[in-house]
Image (cartoon, coloured by chain):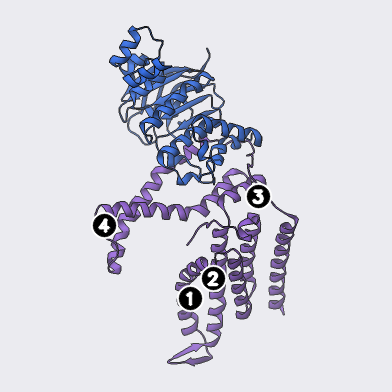
Chain colours: A blue, B purple
């Protein structure tokens, strides 16, 4: 399958920084992929998302060396702090989610349809007429993810997307991702939440000091729990459940 | 009170361009009129404008607070230090032409501030964005204007949050003017630094939502405009031009 994003020996340095944030990074992401990016704070995971989606250095500045090919028409990105991602120009959640599609110049009916579809996916349809600034952090984060999805991106980068969510809302968010990927979107998710990442990602890379130090199957890179090991041994198809509740949900399905 | 106040007044329901045209006419009219009686008629017109918008009490209070220092300055500069002839009011000998000048200048400032605050309180930034989008105004200009209109309420909200957080950590508000001045330090620094820190993410988020797209944005819910409102705006333009023509004709005479 053709890669939507391909990095070969990419090194990226922020303006004024003494050391590069990414060093000699190579990876490919194709349509339908879910790639987890793991690493301690400062390892370069957020920067990798910005480089892979083309926002660095175009928007944030800095210097990029190496080869980067982005075949995606549209890239979406979601950050951990949802309140910084509001446009501040929309009176309702429906309009906030429709902002991106409207910016593309899509016909009004298509914008509305994309917004409704994204709201239904993220289970925020009941918030459609609320004012975005009045939402809780968790509600807002789901709205922001819905806003990114409404643009029908080819590549979606999620930077710690569940940081503001309670466990149930985080589960709901991660549960949406396989269906989004199945529809042809490549997803990169950087998160310290290895269990949830391993649940949705097939592949993962681990970063340390800007370098990829491990890559491979998500369960191998992110660490496998005993439950996942049992599921694997029992012949369950991946992704493997990582904890007992997830295993029970899988069995129930 | 500086910022949008939701409501159902005629000004709230009018096309945003109409409300802005009325405020603009007050602004331009203020400089076209030169006699105290004319300027004070304009102040009365600004008060009527504010009353029609249902925000007279809130706007007038803020307008008076903002223009009070200017009134004091004008009184000292023109009333006390102005040219002869003088009239005695109690123990003070006031300059007659100076007081007339102070009344004109003060009236202008009051009318402009009241008109501007009324427009801020009755023009929904969201509706203004929709109107400008429907009019084909590039998003950069739209965003510049709309974010200017919303910056004060946003800063006020953030300042409240910072003050609450600082009070939780022992900051004492109130007391002498010097103590109040000292309390500005723990407010101003986080306010400015926090805003700067979030700008990068906001720029990225807007870019990711297609704000920089070359496509013409789709207006999702453009406010209704009517022939009567367009005629009113044209009439205001003619009125302002006539006022300036009258001013220059009178000066020549």
Chain letter of mark 2 equals B
Q: Residues within 10 Å of mark 4 (few under 14, many from 20)?
A: few
> Vertically, is B91 above or below A105?
below
Q: Secondary structure at mark 2?
A: helix
Q: Which residue has dot 1 on it?
A: B71
Q: Secondary structure at mark 3?
A: loop
Residue A77 pos. (x, y %): 47, 31
Residue B35 pos. (x, y %): 62, 79
User: Could you tell me how far apart the alpha carbons at marks 4 and 1 are, in whole angstroms?
Assistant: 34 Å
Q: Earlier in the sequence, mark 3 or mark 1?
A: 1
Rendered residue at 56%/41% (across/down): A95
Q: Which residue has dot 2 on it?
A: B109
Q: Earlier in the sequence, mark 3 or mark 2?
A: 2
Q: Earlier in the sequence, mark 1 or mark 2?
A: 1
Question: Which is more toward the observer, B226 or A172?
Answer: A172
The answer as to whether the residues below labels 4 and 3 share one chain is yes
- Of labels 3 and 1, the one closer to you: 3
Residues tagged 1 and 2 counted as in contact (Cβ below 8 A): yes
Q: Secondary structure at mark 1?
A: helix
Residue B217 pos. (x, y %): 62, 39
For residue B223, which numbered disc appears in the image?
A: 3
Rendered residue at 46%/46% (across/down): A133
Question: Which is more toward the observer, A21 or B144?
Answer: B144
User: Could you tell me how far apart the alpha carbons at marks 3 and 1 are, in whole angstroms?
Assistant: 39 Å
């Amino acid at each position: 399958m053709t890669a939507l994003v391909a990095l070969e020996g990419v090194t990226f340095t922020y303006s004024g920084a003494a050391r590069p944030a990414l060093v000699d990074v190579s990876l490919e992401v194709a349509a339908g992929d879910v790639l987890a990016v793991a690493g301690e704070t400062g390892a370069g995971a957020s920067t990798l998302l910005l480089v892979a989606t083309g926002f660095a250095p175009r928007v944030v500045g800095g210097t990029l060396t190496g080869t980067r090919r982005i075949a995606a028409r549209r890239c979406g990105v979601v950050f951990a702090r949802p309140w910084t991602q509001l446009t501040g120009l929309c009176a309702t959640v429906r309009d906030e989610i429709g902002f991106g599609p409207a910016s593309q110049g899509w016909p009004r009916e298509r914008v509305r349809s994309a917004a409704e579809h994204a709201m239904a996916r993220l289970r925020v349809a009941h918030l459609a007429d609320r004012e975005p600034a009045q939402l809780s952090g968790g509600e807002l984060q789901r709205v922001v993810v819905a806003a990114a999805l409404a643009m029908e991106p080819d590549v979606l980068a999620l930077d710690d997307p569940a940081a503001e969510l309670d466990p149930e809302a985080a589960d709901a968010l991660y549960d949406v991702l396989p269906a989004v990927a199945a529809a042809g979107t490549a997803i990169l998710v950087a998160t310290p939440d290895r269990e949830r990442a391993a649940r949705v990602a097939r592949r993962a890379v681990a970063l340390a000091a800007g370098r990829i130090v491990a890559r491979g199957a998500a369960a191998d890179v992110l660490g496998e729990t005993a439950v996942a090991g049992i599921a694997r041994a029992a012949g369950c198809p991946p992704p493997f459940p990582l904890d007992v509740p997830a295993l029970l949900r899988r069995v129930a399905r | 009170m500086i910022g949008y106040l939701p409501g159902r007044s005629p000004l709230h329901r009018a096309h945003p361009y109409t409300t802005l045209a009325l405020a603009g006419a007050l602004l331009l009219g203020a400089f076209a009129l030169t006699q105290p009686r004319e300027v004070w008629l304009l102040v009365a017109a600004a008060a009527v404008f504010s009353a029609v918008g249902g925000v007279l009490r809130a706007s007038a209070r803020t307008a008076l607070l903002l223009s009070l220092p200017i009134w004091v300055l004008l009184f000292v500069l023109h009333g006390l230090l102005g040219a002869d002839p003088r009239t005695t009011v109690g123990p003070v000998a006031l300059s007659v032409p100076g007081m007339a000048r102070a009344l004109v200048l003060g009236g202008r400032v009051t009318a402009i501030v009241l008109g501007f605050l009324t427009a801020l309180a009755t023009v929904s930034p969201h509706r203004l964005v929709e109107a400008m989008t429907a009019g084909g105004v590039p998003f950069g200009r739209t965003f510049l204007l709309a974010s200017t209109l919303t910056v004060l309420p946003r800063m006020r909200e953030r300042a409240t949050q910072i003050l609450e957080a600082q009070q939780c950590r022992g900051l004492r508000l109130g007391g002498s003017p010097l103590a109040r001045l000292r309390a500005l330090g723990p407010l101003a620094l986080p306010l400015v630094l926090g805003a700067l820190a979030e700008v990068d993410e906001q720029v990225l988020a807007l870019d990711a939502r297609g704000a920089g797209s070359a496509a013409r944005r789709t207006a999702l819910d453009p406010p209704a405009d009517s022939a009567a409102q367009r005629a009113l705006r044209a009439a205001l333009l003619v009125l302002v031009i006539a006022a300036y023509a009258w001013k220059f004709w009178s000066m020549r005479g």
